[in-house]
Amino acid sequence: MTLMDVAFHYAAQPGENQMRAIGRVREVYGIRRIAFSEKERTLKIEYDASRLSESVVAGLLRNAGIDLLETLILA
């Protein structure tokens, strides 16, 4: 298992439907943790890189209705 973190800025505040869809993303094998920061409008994901790639994680979030703007560089 290779754990990775990725963070994204998002545009619109997620609504009820998007939050339900995020709940389903959390059930995807390889997604370990999802954390929102409403103040900074960021979304941080911890995932297993041996199972998923950053682009797959972004695709899951977009399919859930999250309007991703950019990927953030984590220090």
Image: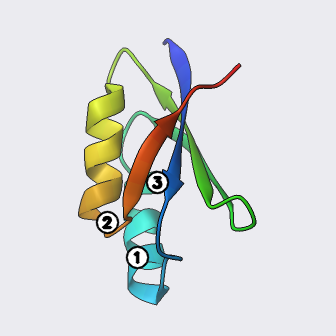
Camera-near label (3 vs 2) is: 2
Residue 13 at what x, y percent from top left?
A: 53, 77
Q: Which residue is mark 1?
A: 18
Q: Is mark 2 in CB contact (under 8 Å) with mark 1?
A: yes
Q: Position of residue 68 (x, y in %)?
A: 39, 55
Establish if 13 lies above or below 33.
below
Q: Determine whether, in the image, residue 74 is placed left or right of residue 62.
A: right
Nearer-N-terminus badge (2/1): 1
**From this viewpoint, which residue is outermost toward the right?**
39
Q: Name the residue type under label 2.
A: Ala
Query: With respect to residue 57, does 37 lie above or below?
Result: below
Check residue 26 in the rendering and tell me which mark sits there, or answer none. Answer: 3
Q: Tell me if 46 is positioned left or right of 53 in this view.
A: right
Q: Secondary structure at mark 3?
A: helix
- The residue wearing badge 2 is 64
Find numbered disc 2 in the image and state the secondary structure of the residue it sits on: loop
In the rendered image, residue 65, in percent from the top left (x then y), is placed at 31, 70
Crowding at dot 2, Cα within 10 Å, few <14 / some 14-19 / many 20+, comes out as some
Mark 1 or mark 3: which comes first in sequence?
Answer: 1
Query: 3 or 14: nearer the eye?
Result: 14
Of 66 and 4, which appears nearest the observer?
66
- Which amino acid, by three-letter code, is at mark 1? Gln
Q: Which one is in front, 22 or 10?
A: 10
Relative to residue 48, is residue 64 drawn left or right?
Answer: left
The residue at the point 29 percent across, 51 percent down is 60
Count of picture labels? 3
Q: Residues within 10 Å of mark 3 (few under 14, many from 20)?
A: some
Instruction: For mark 1, give the secondary structure.
Output: helix
